[in-house]
Image (cartoon, rainbow, N blue to C red):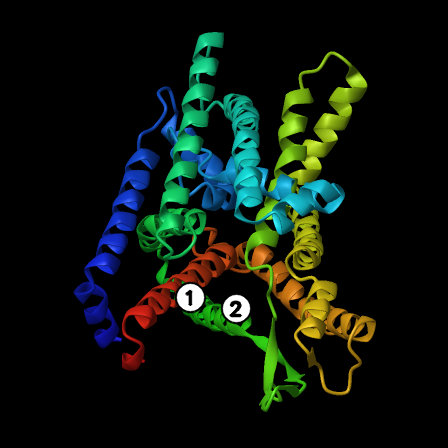
């Protein structure tokens, strides 16, 4: 490990990339600590202590929501826009063709549309957040100009972070959006540890030990599931060209246990956000029936049992959905057949497609259930121990571990390109 760190700092290009990314993350953290004027910090702190959902939402904003900063939405609108575009590829064939078949130009156009969708989504989410915060007495009385100013600032902050994320991604050392979320979680750890220390009760020492052991076990489980894969054996037929024989090799097709990563949790979070926000809009409506529905929706989403159950189901469902988006058994089967490859004991063509689909469904079940449990883990721990573990809970750990693994692999890939013999 020390040898690899030494090699990283010996290679000027790689060293410059890492320092550049660290510099951008510092800029992000500075922006995340510039609050919007008029925020009641005591009321805000109390609000987050009593609301697990917004604690989780703060994770995906990169920590900017916790202080109602100028980047309070973080990269959330960009993630939501990406989700919408991916959903549309399943519905609109021409959009799917643009993304998958038209090469780099098609993907650039697809990404440009995603950026355009981010702007109205950011404005809508900011307005919803302002309405909610005003109802909780976190923001004082605001006139129309104040509301417009906050919306413009928040939208500009989200667009700026989207740009930072793309700059980071261009350096080929991890995903920019993931690293921004990672930086927000890691920045919140000292405060979370400090809070645990300040509220430490010697009589609950055994509870804290169990929590620590549980955290270590969860980290180990996340690493195992993130790295877990099933290797499907693939053989290639021998081909004779002229006087030479080609092929006849055997390899494997890796099928990951968790193809979707942390995306299903983000999908589910986005879906769970909207009913509560819409209900807050409609609570003051003039029609009594609409008010009753809004109040019922608001109350039921504040029920921990209902919220946890719905969240779990959505995470499992979105894991299957996103796996279907990123893994196409028919395309893989066609590719194998064109290259003269086959799975031993399985006929090429439709039989291979059905076999891969069957295997992937079985593997995804365990990955989906694991993600579902990880998503609701903070609620379970708080219910058992009474300790708020949103920052260091299952979802936070999953993101941190997944980003660390992805970044380490990206850096190792950069090192291998420059010093293959050293590995």
- Whether residue 98 is visible: yes
Q: Residue 291: horizontal and vertical position, in percent?
A: 74, 21
Q: Nearer the viewer, residue 136 or 274?
A: 274
Farthest-out residue, front: 242
- Provide the residue designation for mark 1: 405
Q: Nearer the viewer, residue 364 or 374?
A: 364
Q: Quadrant of the C terminus?
A: bottom left
* Total numbered labels placed on residues in the image: 2
- Give the numbered dot on residue 226: 2
Q: Earlier in the sequence, mark 1 or mark 2?
A: 2
Q: Is residue 199 left or right of residue 397?
A: left
Q: Is residue 402 left or right of residue 355?
A: left
Q: Residue 241: horizontal and vertical position, in percent?
A: 62, 84
Q: Nearer the viewer, residue 203 or 15?
A: 15
Is residue 165 placed above or below 134 in the rendered structure? below
Q: CA distance from mark 1 to mark 2?
A: 9 Å
- Whether residue 360 is visible: no
Q: Residues within 10 Å of mark 1 (few under 14, many from 20)?
A: some
Residue contact between numbered discs 1 and 2, judged by CB atoms under 8 Å: yes
Residue at the image point whose x is 70% and y is 49% from the top: 310
Is residue 238 placed above or below 50 in the rendered structure? below
For mark 1, give the secondary structure.
Answer: helix
């Amino acid at each position: 490990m020390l040898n690899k760190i030494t090699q990283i700092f010996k290679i000027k290009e790689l060293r410059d990339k890492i320092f550049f990314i660290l510099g951008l993350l510092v800029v992000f953290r500075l922006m995340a600590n510039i609050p919007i004027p008029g925020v009641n910090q005591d009321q805000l702190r109390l609000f987050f202590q009593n609301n697990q959902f917004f604690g989780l939402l703060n994770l995906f904003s990169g920590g900017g929501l916790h202080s109602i900063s100028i980047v309070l939405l973080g990269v959330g609108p960009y993630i939501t826009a990406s989700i919408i575009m991916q959903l549309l590829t399943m519905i609109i064939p021409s959009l799917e063709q643009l993304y998958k078949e038209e090469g780099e130009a098609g993907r650039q156009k697809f990404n440009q549309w995603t950026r355009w969708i981010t702007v109205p989504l950011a404005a809508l989410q900011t307005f919803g957040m302002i309405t909610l915060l005003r109802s909780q007495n976190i923001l004082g009385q605001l006139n129309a100009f104040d509301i417009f100013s906050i919306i413009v600032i928040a939208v500009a902050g989200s667009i700026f972070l989207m740009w930072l994320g793309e700059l980071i991604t261009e350096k080929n050392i991890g995903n920019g959006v993931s690293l921004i979320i990672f930086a927000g979680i890691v920045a919140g750890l000292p405060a979370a540890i400090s809070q645990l220390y300040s509220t430490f009760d010697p009589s609950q020492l055994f509870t804290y030990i169990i929590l620590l052991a549980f955290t270590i076990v969860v980290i180990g489980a996340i690493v195992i599931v993130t790295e877990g894969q099933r290797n499907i054996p693939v053989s290639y037929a021998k081909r004779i060209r002229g006087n030479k024989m080609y092929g006849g090799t055997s390899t494997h097709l890796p099928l990951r246990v968790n193809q979707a990563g942390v995306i299903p949790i983000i999908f589910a979070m986005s879906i769970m956000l909207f009913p509560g926000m819409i209900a807050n809009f409609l609570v003051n409506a003039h029609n009594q029936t609409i008010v009753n529905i809004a109040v019922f929706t608001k109350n039921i989403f504040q029920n921990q049992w209902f919220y946890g159950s719905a969240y779990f189901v959505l995470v499992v469902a979105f894991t299957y959905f996103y796996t279907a988006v990123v893994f196409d058994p028919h395309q893989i089967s066609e590719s194998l057949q064109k290259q003269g490859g086959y799975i031993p004991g399985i006929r090429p063509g439709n039989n291979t497609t059905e076999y891969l689909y069957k295997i992937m469904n079985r593997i995804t079940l365990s990955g989906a259930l694991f993600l579902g449990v990880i998503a609701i883990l903070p609620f379970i721990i708080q219910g058992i121990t009474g300790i708020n573990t949103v920052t260091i809970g299952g979802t936070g750990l999953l993101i941190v571990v997944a980003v660390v693994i992805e970044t380490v692999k990206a850096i190792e890939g950069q090192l291998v390109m420059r010093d293959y013999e050293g590995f």
